Image: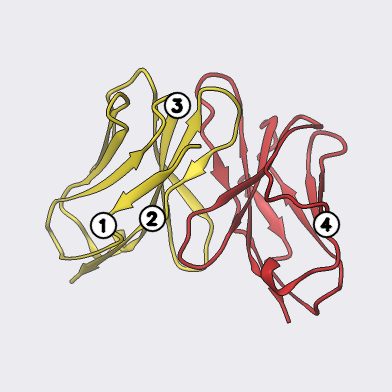
Chain colours: A yellow, B red
Amino acid sequence: KQEVTQIPAALSVPEGENLVLNCSFTDSAIYNLQWFRQDPGKGLTSLLLIQSSQREQTSGRLNASLDKSSGRSTLYIAASQPGDSATYLCAVRPDRGQNFVFGPGTRLSVLP
Amino acid sequence: DTGVSQDPRHKITKRGQNVTFRCDPISEHNRLYWYRQTLGQGPEFLTYFQNEAQLEKSRLLSDRFSAERPKGSFSTLEIQRTEQGDSAMYLCASSLGGTYNEQFFGPGTRLTVL
């Protein structure tokens, strides 16, 4: 059974810092991995999607990497801003099927 | 707005009542997903449709839950005889399918069972 964990559970940083969020999964038989942000009481916003054959994806100040064999992904946020404050979730799609499995999220606070 | 929409946004009901939620996916997306999310947790997969066919169901989807996507467009999720443990945010997502398969989520329906 696929299990996804995220470390740390919560993170508080001053504005301008670069930071790394971690996502680990137990079964490396994945099709892709997707990073989302979620604001309180709202739905999820897609940030980046990495196919299993890819090593990384970049969008603006965000960079996500994937090491499928070791079951790890990281989300790097450069020059953090207060508007980045949200919960960040990773989700993996298995090789077979559509049963996406989410991690519990990392709650990020960027202080002005 | 061409994103995923859900209705209602909030629902308060008494234990034992039936409730139905609606999801309208992005129009060209043939894949539709339902998830449930409780406070402080990530979403949990409930079920998946490709066009009108329900292809996967989680064991979380007890016999009190039923989902439909009659014409391959909008979908409904019905919960019968609601219990307090059903209180959660119900999220819908859609994707185009194919190789890329990026999911796009709606704003969710917050269910409170009293």
Q: Residues within 10 Å of mark 2 (few under 14, many from 20)?
A: many
Amino acid at pointer 4: Arg
Residue annotated with mark 4: B64
Q: Is residue A79 above or below residue A63?
A: below
Disc assigned to residue A30? 3
Q: Are marks 3 and 1 on the same chain?
A: yes
Q: Are marks 1 and 4 on the same chain?
A: no
Give the chain of mark 3: A
Q: Are marks 3 and 4 on the same chain?
A: no
Disc number placed over residue A105 in the picture, else none: 2
Q: Quadrant of the C terminus of chain B?
A: bottom right
Residue at image x 66%, y 41%? B33
Q: Residue A97's x, y, as percent?
A: 60, 27
Residues behind callouts 4 and 2 on a single chain: no
From this view, report whether residue A48 is shown above or below residue A89.
above
Q: Position of residue B70 (x, y in %)?
A: 87, 38
Q: CA distance from mark 2 to mark 3?
A: 19 Å
What numbered label is drawn on residue B12? none
Chain of the residue where label 4 is placed in the rendered structure: B
The three-letter code of the residue at mark 2 reads Gly
Q: CA distance from mark 1 to mark 4?
A: 36 Å
Residue B44 visible, this orientation: yes
Counting every numbered tag in the picture gives: 4
Residue toward you, A34 or A47: A34
Q: Nearer the viewer, residue A67 or A2?
A: A2
